[in-house]
Image (cartoon, coloured by chain):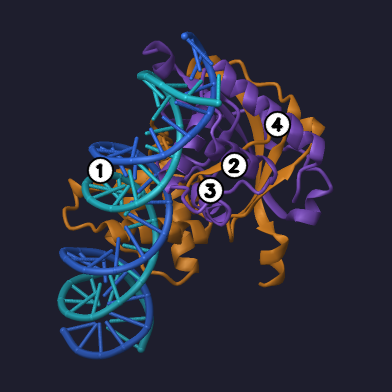
Chain colours: A orange, B purple, C blue, D cyan
Amino acid sequence: MRVSRDKLTKRMEEFRAALKRAGLKITPQRLAVFARLAEEDSHPGARAIHGKLKKKMPGLSLDTVYRTLWLFVDLGIVENMGEIDGVRFDANTEPHHHFICRKCGASFDIYCRDFDDLKLPGELSEIGEAMKAMVEVRGICRKCLSRK
Amino acid sequence: MRVSRDKLTKRMEEFRAALKRAGLKITPQRLAVFARLAEEDSHPGARAIHGKLKKKMPGLSLDTVYRTLWLFVDLGIVENMGEIDGVRFDANTEPHHHFICRKCGASFDIYCRDFDDLKLPGELSEIGEAMKAMVEVRGICRKCLSRK
DNA sequence: TCCTAAATTGGAAAAATTACTATTTGGAGG
DNA sequence: CCTCCAAATAGTAATTTTTCCAATTTAGGA
């Protein structure tokens, strides 16, 4: 799905501001990667972004895309979805939720009754058939906080 | 953290029942992988599981671990965390939530006011410092439903 | 315009995951 | 308890994803 024009403009402004604030250069590559990410809400991976941009920007290296994306995550203007180091597995079949550390990727179970039976919005049926809902809390874990 | 003895027993029962129901063999490898996963709530990845089990079961192949874990996901006794095909990125800075398709891995944004300001449980502070909470809904997307 | 630290490229390396074949084995049926 | 065979595994090769690095280019301040 496409993002509206003014949302896009707003995001591009935030992007420029964040780079300026951090004293980083505004390069064509960074502009292209961010724009690509900001104008769609399909949450692409690095390869997908690289593939799309390669047409307009043949020299673009895959490494740059990766480096750029993680830079954006560090700057707080982009969020990563999914674990840092590959897929993980969970055999806990009871209702529970997750805390995930942004620094080290560690994850912890959270038990919270209020979260167990969230009422899902009706429009969800347009997207698909929901089977389960859980809350994902992101932050910094104790260990990472202390060794900071 | 360790899981209590009766929870573990219960999970092992469910595991045996699920394999039986599907007409699959209960092998030492499957028992070991599931037990390893069920007795901890640290959500390990395939490599971590393989590494731990290698000591007791020197011949265990990494392929078996991967195959076994995805089998468990298919059977519904294990849930995978993180995207199927690598890390993804999201430049949407507005409060929103995600629907993720179990079949194809596609993800969609959900907007739902009720989810935007979930009250986090106090015990969370023992785990770390929370920065953001979002709801992750899992199910089957329209496309996958229709092509079923 | 010039200069320099920062950024990018392209290719190589590392890590994660899947594929494949020969061999082994769980467990159904005798 | 044997026997047997479809199912499962081991070991290794292939593929995919991600990161690293040295050489080169460039954004943007002076």
The mark lying in front, picked from 3 and 4, is: 4
Question: Which residue type does callout 1 highlight?
Answer: Lys
Nearest the eye: A31 or B90? B90
Picture layout, residue A3 above or below residue C29: below
Check chain identity for marks 1 and 2: say if they share one.
Answer: no
Q: Is residue A18 left or right of residue A1?
A: right
The mark lying in front, picked from 3 and 1, is: 3
Q: CA distance from mark 3 to mark 4?
A: 19 Å
Question: Which residue type does callout 3 highlight?
Answer: Gly
Q: Which residue is mark 2?
A: B32
Question: Which residue type does callout 4 highlight?
Answer: Arg
Q: Is residue A99 left or right of residue A56?
A: right
Q: Which residue is mark 1?
A: A52
The label on residue A103 is none
Q: Chain of mark 4?
A: B
The label on residue B45 is 3
Q: Which tag, 3 or 2, sits closer to the chain's start? A: 2
Expressed as whole percent of the image width and height from the top left, the position of residue B124 reads 78, 49
Q: Which tag, 3 or 4, sits closer to the chain's start? A: 4
**Count of numbered labels shown in the rendering:** 4
Q: Are marks 2 and 4 in contact (CB under 8 Å)?
A: no
Expressed as whole percent of the image width and height from the top left, the position of residue A34 reads 38, 51
Q: Which residue is mark 4?
A: B11
Whether residue B84 is visible to the viewer of this picture, yes or no, is no
Q: Are marks 3 and 1 in contact (CB under 8 Å)?
A: no
Q: CA distance from mark 1 to mark 2?
A: 43 Å
Q: Are marks 4 and 1 in contact (CB under 8 Å)?
A: no
Q: CA distance from mark 4 to mark 1?
A: 45 Å
Q: Chain of mark 1?
A: A
Q: Chain of mark 3?
A: B
Identified at 80% across, 40% down, the residue is: B5
Quarter holding the C terminus of chain B is top left
